[in-house]
Image (tube, rainbow, N blue to C red):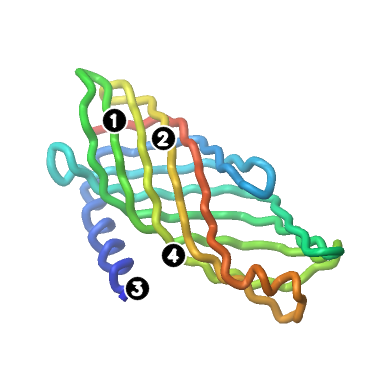
Amino acid sequence: MKRLVYVVCLCAGLSGLVSAQSLGLHGSYLDVRDGGDAYGVGAVLKASLTELIFVEGRISRYEGIDSSSSSGPLRLQFESDLTPIEVGLGVELPLGASASFWLSGGVYWMRLSSDATLNGEPVPVDVDNNRGWYALAGLGTGDRVQLYIEGQYRTTDAEFSTSVPVPALADLSDTDLHKVSFNVGVRIRW
């Protein structure tokens, strides 16, 4: 049933984006709880369905995300690249002649590629975490060219598997990934 909901949301969102009326490009900061900070880039297409309601498609790219965990004498280190692709619905409210505020949310597919080491030795790890959801709030100013700032929350369930029977990896078999990001960019409307 979950897969059907994702497919319906994806199809509805992509069909609405055919008539996109704005394109935004932004720099992004991703808060990695157990690692360092991650910076990336992203793009967003928006298409109005009514005066206030819009559909959006988003893509972001973060590289070189480092995170680690320990279990007794074992130290597990991950270096990851993250690419979320998102489709959602939102509401945009005008705040005067040239400013607006928006809230949106939707589903996303995430590609996470990770290299893992256990006490410095490479460990083959597969990550199956391709679906999740997001919520976002943004504020923009400008008419045809708009400067904007956004705060975004993403969550997904990640399933890690390895061909090496390591007790430290058993605790990671099903992990919730919660990520907060902040975007600053320029949106062009037509």
Residue at x 83%, y 64% (from the top left corner): 72
Closer to the N terminus: mark 4 or mark 3? 3
As rendered, which of 153 and 22 lies closer to the eye?
153
Left or right of 61 in this view: 132: left
Residue at x 30%, y 47% (from the top left corner): 56
Residue at x 64%, y 75% (from the top left corner): 161
Name the kind of residue labelled 3 in the image.
Arg
Looking at the image, is 96 positioned above or below residue 158? above
Q: Contact, CB < 8 Å: mark 2 with mark 3?
A: no
Helix, strand or loop under label 2: strand
Q: How many marks?
A: 4
Looking at the image, is 140 positioned above or below residue 108? above
Q: In x, y percent, where is residue 118?
A: 81, 66
Q: Residues within 10 Å of mark 3 (few under 14, many from 20)?
A: few
Q: Contact, CB < 8 Å: mark 1 with mark 2?
A: no
Measure the alpha-carbon separation of dots 1 and 2: 10 Å
Q: In x, y percent, where is residue 152?
A: 43, 42
- Residue pointed to by mark 3: 3
Looking at the image, is 187 positioned above or below residue 157? above
Measure the alpha-carbon separation of dots 2 and 3: 28 Å
Q: Residues within 10 Å of mark 2 (few under 14, many from 20)?
A: some
Residue at x 26%, y 56% (from the top left corner): 13
- Residue pointed to by mark 1: 101
Closer to the N terminus: mark 1 or mark 4? 1
- Residue pointed to by mark 4: 131
Measure the alpha-carbon separation of dots 2 and 4: 22 Å
Residue 180, numbered circle: none
- Residue pointed to by mark 2: 150
Name the kind of residue labelled 2 in the image.
Glu
